[in-house]
Every structure is written in structure tokens, then in C-alpha cells.
Amino acid sequence: MNRDNISVNEYYHIYNRGVGKKIILKDDRDRARFLFLILYFQTENNFPQISRIISSYVKHRVFDIKSDLTTKKFVELTGFALMPNHFHLIVKEIKERGIGKYMQRVLNSYTKYFNARYGVSGHLFEGPYKAVHVESNEQLLHLSAYVHLNSRELNEWRRKEESFPWSSYQDYVKENRWGSLLETGIIIEQFKNRKEYKSFVETSGAKEIKDELVLD
């Protein structure tokens, strides 16, 4: 869709992949970096010591940030999956042009980091990010299932997708690791408990959504 048509208080499926299906997340440091960006760049805050924060996460699986960064968000992150050569996000626009600002910050920051770390230059992602408007509650629920099943594409995570550390699935079926940086309520509160949501994901047939994407 035309990214200028994104509307406040609406949900969108945001996705992109590496140019030429290039691997964009090579190891845990890369994945932690991208995860940090999608969580903490929902606000205007700047982080002059990102490398130190990422090193701490790689060692201890926690971002060492003490201040409250959840106020004045211009988007809300509802779900995510980080794969070797692509990513999926479920994002709600809070302020006008919030998603555009958010994605520009995330992708520009990550590209700069990636090129510096690996000694390369040029474009990392395959064109502008894609944004698909979520038009109904049913579509939102099935989109969440689709995103959370993405790790099935990785042989080592097949049948244990809920433990994949680089998606929000475990935050839905176990405990939300990120507090208000990941807004799960719009989806999880529609189910009696986390077990019922997990059953929905596993039986939803949501992978059919893949037919609509240009990632294939």
C-alpha cells in the first residue's frame, strides 16, 4: 500500500527482507541489535551506548536500561518475528506518520550498523518496507498466528516455535518479556488463557497468508 495512507489507530503488517534474499541477521548480536531497535525506537529517545546495551543482552538476555521509555510512543509494537533474511512486525500507528518515522529510524540505524560491522556498503533491504493494512479483528488474529509460526521455516525450531527467542510468540504463550514495549493485550485478551491462544495459532492455517506476500 501507499505508506502515505497509513492512518492513526490502525494496525499494519510491516515486513521486508534483505536485498537479493541476503542474510540480514547473521548471529545473536545482529538479532539483539534489531530487536533492541524495534522495541526502543517506538519513542523519540536516543541511545548513545547501544553497543554496550547489546553486549549486555547477548550475555545476560536483558537490556540494561533503567529509565522509563514507554511514554510518548508514536507507534505500538504488537508482534514480531526476526528471521535470517527477513522480518515481520505488527504495528499500530499512534501519531500521524509514526510508522514512517519508526521504520526510518529502525532500518537506517540497522543498515549503518550492519555495513560498519561487516565492512560493506550500499542497500541492505530490498526496497522500502511493505505495509499491509489490517482490516478486521479476524485478520489481526490470523496475522499474529502467521507471524508467530514463521520460525517453522527453521528446522531447529520446528515444533518448538513458542521457545524461539527472536519472535513475540513466547511473550504470548509464556510471559511478556518486554512489558509495555510489546502491547499484546489487543490479541491475548480475546482468549480465555495463553493455552487457548497457542491452540488457535497451531490450528489457524495462518501460513496461508504467505500466499499474499512478496517475500516468497
Image (cartoon, rainbow, N blue to C red):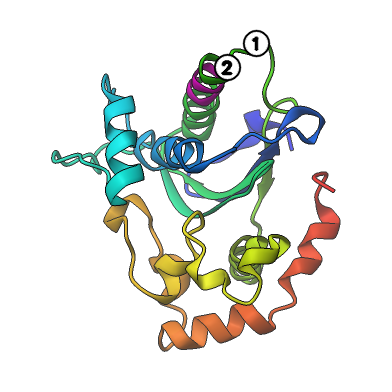
Within 10 Å of disc 2 (Cα), the crowding (few <14, some 14-19, many 20+) is some
Q: Secondary structure at mark 1?
A: loop
Q: Please give the range of residues in magenta.
A: 109-114
Q: CA distance from mark 1 to mark 2?
A: 5 Å
**Does residue 136 appear anywhere in the picture?**
no
Vertical order, 102 against 90 (above or below): above
Task: Name the one closer to the observer, 67 or 191.
Answer: 67
The percent coordinates of residue 114 (x first, y second) are 55, 23
The percent coordinates of residue 189 (x first, y second) are 40, 76
**Between discs 1 and 2, the one toward the N terminus:** 2
User: Residue at label 1?
Assistant: 121
Vertical order, 113 against 68 (above or below): above
Quarter of the image for residue 171 reads bottom left
The percent coordinates of residue 143 (x first, y second) are 64, 63
The percent coordinates of residue 210 (x first, y second) are 79, 59
Relative side of 57 to 197, left or right: left
User: Residue at label 2?
Assistant: 115
Q: Label 2 near label 1: C-beta < 8 Å?
A: yes
Within 10 Å of disc 1 (Cα), the crowding (few <14, some 14-19, many 20+) is few
